[in-house]
Structures are given as C-alpha cells and as structure tokens.
Image: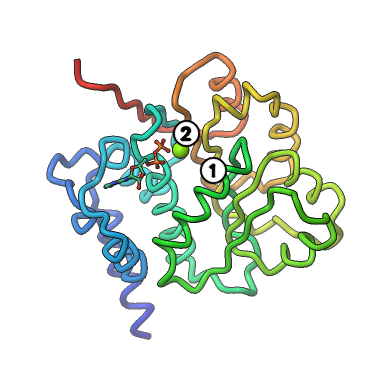
Amino acid sequence: KRVKDDLEVLQAATDALDPKNPDIKKFTDLPLCEPTSAGLRDSHFEVLTDVQRAAIPLALKGNDILGAAKTGSGKTLAFLIPVLEKLYCAQWTEYDGLGALIISPTRELAVQIFEVLRKIGRKHQFSAGLVIGGKSLKEEAERLGRMNILVCTPGRMLQHLDQTAGFDVDNLQVLVLDEADRIMDMGFQSAVDALVEHLPKTRQTMLFSATQSKRVSDLARLSLKDPEYVSVHEAA
Ligand code: ADP
Ligand code: MG
C-alpha cells in the first residue's frame, strides 16, 4: 500500500514536471524514486549536464528521444536514469522478463554502459546482463531469460532473438540505441533493423548519437515515434 502511494506521488510529480523548467539543475530537482536517487548520490552525481537537463525530463514523461550531443557530454545517464525509472514505476520484477534493451556498437562501450548501470542501479532489484559475445551462445542464452535489463551489441543480440528458444521480448518497455552514428558507420544497419522487427511496437525508444547524419535520421525514422529532438551544442 505504501509503495503504491509512493508511486502515485512520483507519477503525479512526473506529470506535473515542466521539461523546459530552467530551475532543474540538480538530480534532486527531478522526480526520481529513492533507489535511483540513492544510486546517484552514492556515485557523487549532483548537477545535470546540458544533455541530461534537456533529455531526462522529456524521457521521464514517456517521450521518445532523438538526442545528439558530443562525446563526453553525459549521454549514458541521460538514458539510464529514465530506463530505471520506467521499470521502477512499472513495478518490474524478475517474473516480468526483459524490460529494457540497450544497444551499443562495440563490446567496450557496452561494458562501460553496464558499469554505469551497476553503479547508479545498485539500490534497485533489477537483474542486468551483458550480451556481447565472447562466451558460447548457449552459456549466454541460459542467463537471458532471467534478465530485466540487457546491454548488447547488435549482431550478438540478433543471434539470440533468431536462435534462442523461449527468449521472450514481448514485454519490452524501453529500447535505447546508443552511439547510433557509430552503429551505422560499423555496418549494423540491417542487424538493427531486424532486431527492431522482433520488438513490440508499443515501447519507449531513445536514440543517442554524437553526430547527426542522414543514416542516423534513417534509423530514427524506423525506430522512433514522434520523437522529441534534443540537440546540445557547445556555446559559441
Ligand atoms: P557520452 O556518452 O556523452 O560520451 P558519458 O555518459 O560517457 O558521455 O559521460 C562522460 C563522463 O562524464 C563520464 O566520466 C561520466 O561519469 C561523467 N558525467 C556524466 N554525467 C555527469 C554529471 N551529471 N555530473 C558529473 N559527471 C558526469
Ligand atoms: Mg556514450
């Protein structure tokens, strides 16, 4: 009952949130659940970066996001915080299966995202895993069914969706495409297209990249629904 009341308060605060409010400067200015707040506090994250200030409120309100901001601007938290909040608000449990899928172009970047997730998500109960190859498909497959959040590379994930029996993604709430420009540069277009085909149409999608290009907007058109454009440039 108390949890339900807390969730209603959180939901009301999120509904009331003005995404353009210039007074949003610190993570404590956002309507975030206690586990996320504690994770950020313990990791010493306090002030939002520009891309986080532009993207997180819109994402918390459920919008699809098409975000462009240069490397080092803090895009990882811009999508990880909304992912955690979405699953928390849905009271996601181990029985609900895969709730969020984060696609990254390389193993190294996937590992980095996973490390940040482990840090800021440590007060949450969600299970999270990496799907980046390097182990046998069978070994990876055995853990997949128990995961709430997966960080993956496109080719490996597609392999599982095509070949791993009983791996169910029908409940998926959030898809993140990180470093979309590099995903396209590395030739993963058709793998990502096929991947997205496997996913439920009703979901929230966030696409981030360091640069804008024709290929990124092609991917965006395919995967996003009425996205909010978030583009952060350096001050002139
Ligand atoms: P990008 O994905 O845009 O290249 P990252 O998400 O990797 O950027 O973040 C770059 C660096 O900035 C990381 O070291 C991260 O810990 C740090 N960082 C991100 N957000 C914040 C913040 N709000 N406050 C302080 N440091 C931050
Ligand atoms: Mg990044």
Q: Amino acid at mark 1?
A: Val
Q: Quadrant of residue 104?
A: top right
Of 203 and 112, nearer the camera is 112
Horizontal side of 156 relative to 227 (left or right) equals right
Horizontal side of 226 relative to 142 (left or right) equals left
Residue 75 point in image, percent of width and height: 40, 39
91 vs 232: above or below: below
Q: Element under label 2?
A: strand
Q: Quadrant of residue 34?
A: bottom left
Of 125 and 109, nearer the camera is 109
Label 1 Cα neighbours within 10 Å, binned few <14 / some 14-19 / many ≥20: many
The residue drawn where x is 55% and y is 38% is 177
Label 2 Cα neighbours within 10 Å, binned few <14 / some 14-19 / many ≥20: many
Label placed on residue 150: none
CA gap, disc 1 to disc 2? 8 Å
Residue 149 point in image, percent of width and height: 58, 59
Q: Is mark 2 within 8 Å of ligand 2?
A: yes
Q: Amino acid at mark 2?
A: Phe
The residue drawn where x is 86% and y is 59% is 165
Q: Element under label 1?
A: strand
Residue 64 point in image, percent of width and height: 46, 39
Q: Which residue is mark 2?
A: 208
Q: Is mark 1 within 8 Å of ligand 2?
A: no
61 vs 1: above or below: above
Contact, CB < 8 Å: mark 1 with mark 2? Answer: yes
The tag earlier along the polypeptide, 1 or 2, is 1
Q: Which residue is mark 1?
A: 176
- Quadrant of the rendering where the C terminus is positioned: top left
The residue drawn where x is 55% and y is 42% is 109
